């Protein structure tokens, strides 16, 4: 499906949008619910990733296909490997079979888990025979993906002696590790994260608990971008908390630099985004090592507003649904941008012209589709393979219509 976007009917007023639960929180809580069935979850994400994990986690034998869902691949690898009696082949899309999982597999093998590679060593598909490992300590490189670490943390309470995880190297995406630790705490599991070491105690059962998932901050980023690119748009998004567990809540401070003010309305658990019309800096410089998922949105916002940006800490973008740095360079260049990338950074040079009616390739990456869509406030634009947004935000195109954009499926 191709989507054509324009702003002919765009109107400037306050629009209310309800965004479903965080994919990151939902997927962590689903693993914990599988370990502790008396845990109840509200406001679960409607994303494809969460649906895949929900269905896959119920199986004990056969094949589980996670498609493009990287979080599901990492979390289910650890879950199945530590669940006695499971005989699972865990696979995914062609791109998923190119995404490395070696560090996690090696760590689980060190604990005593039985995992074999079905094709290329270091990559899915995986053949997993579940068991309860007796070893309670493991080392893992921490500079590749925090999801490997969170996967180990989530299954740690079921191990006979819990688990101590020693992190080697600079730790990537610390907020996601802290999110996992906080969710464990919410259900009564008191782990610690100090320096380069994480310790999770064994817990056989928990008291009855209900956890309400906060709405997804990564999805909120696209509305920050819309407000930043508009002349006077206000958007109220629900349900958000000032004391969020999600690292992408850094949007509040980042987009203040891009002309968007955030006001938390506690009585409604809502966040009101308004255009400040303040003068923008000529260049925005950001280290996004802790918030890599909003890099695409920020780059597009800067391009749309004609300012430069220097974004670093982006090494994990190369192993996402696509190589996001290359994809950003390709598509921004089509629009007339001058972009330079390295292995972990992006530099966008300011410019005053945007090529109209460009077709944006999405590379099977939901964030490419959603990040580029707000440029429709500046020029007509087409998004190819637009259905890819279902991975994290199935209602995205309908919500853009609510904002007032013209969205035509072709």
Image: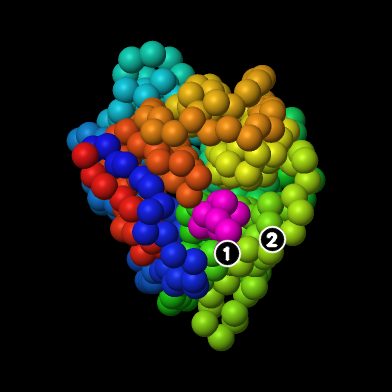
**Image marks 2 and 1: residues in contact by CB distance under 8 Å:** yes
Image coords of residue 310 (percent x, y): 73, 33
Residue plotted at (32% across, 19% down)? 118
Magenta segment boundaries in residue numbering = 223-232
Crowd tier of the residue under label 1, counting other residues whose Cα lies within 10 Å: few below 14, some 14–19, many 20 or above? some
Which residue is pictured at 41% across the width and 52% down the height? Answer: 7
Q: Residues within 10 Å of mark 2 (few under 14, many from 20)?
A: some
Mark 2 and mark 1: Cα distance apart in space: 8 Å
**373 with respect to 253 (left or right):** left
- Predominant SS of the magenta segment: helix
Which numbered circle lies on residue 180?
none
Residue most extreme to the top: 120
Image disc number at residue 232 = 1
The colour scheme used here is: rainbow
- Coordinates of residue 210 in the picture (x, y in percent): 44, 75
Residue at x 62%, y 75% (from the top left corner): 264
Say if the magenta span includes residue 225. Answer: yes
Q: Which residue is mark 2?
A: 277
Q: Is residue 149 above or below residue 184?
A: above
Q: Secondary structure at mark 2?
A: loop
Q: Nearer the viewer, residue 344 or 131?
A: 344
Relative to residue 287, is residue 41 drawn left or right? left
| Viewer-closest of 161 and 6 | 6
Q: Is residue 229 visible?
A: yes
């Amino acid at each position: 499906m191709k989507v054509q976007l324009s702003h002919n009917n765009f109107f400037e007023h306050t629009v209310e949008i309800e965004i479903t639960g965080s994919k990151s929180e939902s997927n962590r809580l689903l693993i914990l619910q599988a370990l502790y069935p008396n845990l109840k979850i509200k406001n679960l994400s409607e994303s494809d990733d969460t649906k895949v994990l929900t269905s896959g986690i119920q199986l004990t034998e056969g094949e589980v296909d996670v498609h493009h869902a990287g979080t599901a691949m990492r979390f289910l690898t650890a879950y199945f490997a530590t669940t006695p009696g499971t005989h699972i082949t865990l696979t995914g899309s062609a791109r998923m079979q190119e995404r490395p999982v070696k560090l996690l597999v090696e760590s689980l093998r060190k604990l005593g888990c039985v995992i074999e590679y079905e094709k290329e060593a270091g990559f899915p598909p995986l053949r997993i025979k579940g068991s309860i490992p007796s070893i309670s300590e493991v080392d893992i490189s921490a500079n590749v993906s925090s999801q490997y670490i969170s996967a180990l943390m989530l299954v740690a309470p079921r191990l006979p002696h819990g688990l101590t995880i020693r992190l080697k190297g600079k730790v990537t995406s610390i907020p996601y590790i802290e999110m996992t630790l906080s969710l464990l705490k919410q259900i009564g599991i008191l782990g610690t994260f100090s320096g380069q070491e994480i310790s999770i105690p064994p817990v056989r059962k928990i008291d009855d608990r209900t956890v309400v998932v906060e709405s997804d901050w990564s999805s909120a980023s696209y509305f920050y971008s819309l407000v930043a690119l508009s002349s006077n748009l206000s958007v109220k998004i629900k349900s958000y908390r000032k004391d969020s567990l999600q690292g992408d809540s850094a949007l509040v401070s980042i987009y203040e630099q891009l002309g968007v003010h955030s006001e938390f309305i506690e009585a409604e658990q809502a966040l009101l985004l308004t255009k400040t019309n303040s003068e923008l800096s000529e260049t925005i410089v950001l280290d996004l090592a802790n918030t890599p998922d909003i890099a695409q949105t920020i780059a597009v916002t800067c391009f749309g507003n004609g300012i430069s940006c220097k974004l670093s800490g982006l090494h994990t973008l190369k192993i996402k649904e696509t190589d996001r740095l290359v994809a950003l360079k390709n598509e921004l260049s089509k629009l007339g941008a001058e972009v330079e990338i390295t292995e972990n950074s992006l530099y966008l040079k300011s410019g005053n012209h945007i090529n109209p009616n460009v077709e944006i390739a999405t590379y099977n990456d939901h964030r490419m589709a959603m990040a580029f869509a707000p440029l429709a406030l500046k020029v007509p634009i087409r998004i190819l393979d637009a259905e890819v947004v279902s991975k994290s935000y199935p209602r995205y195109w309908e919500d853009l219509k609510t904002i007032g954009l013209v969205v035509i499926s072709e």
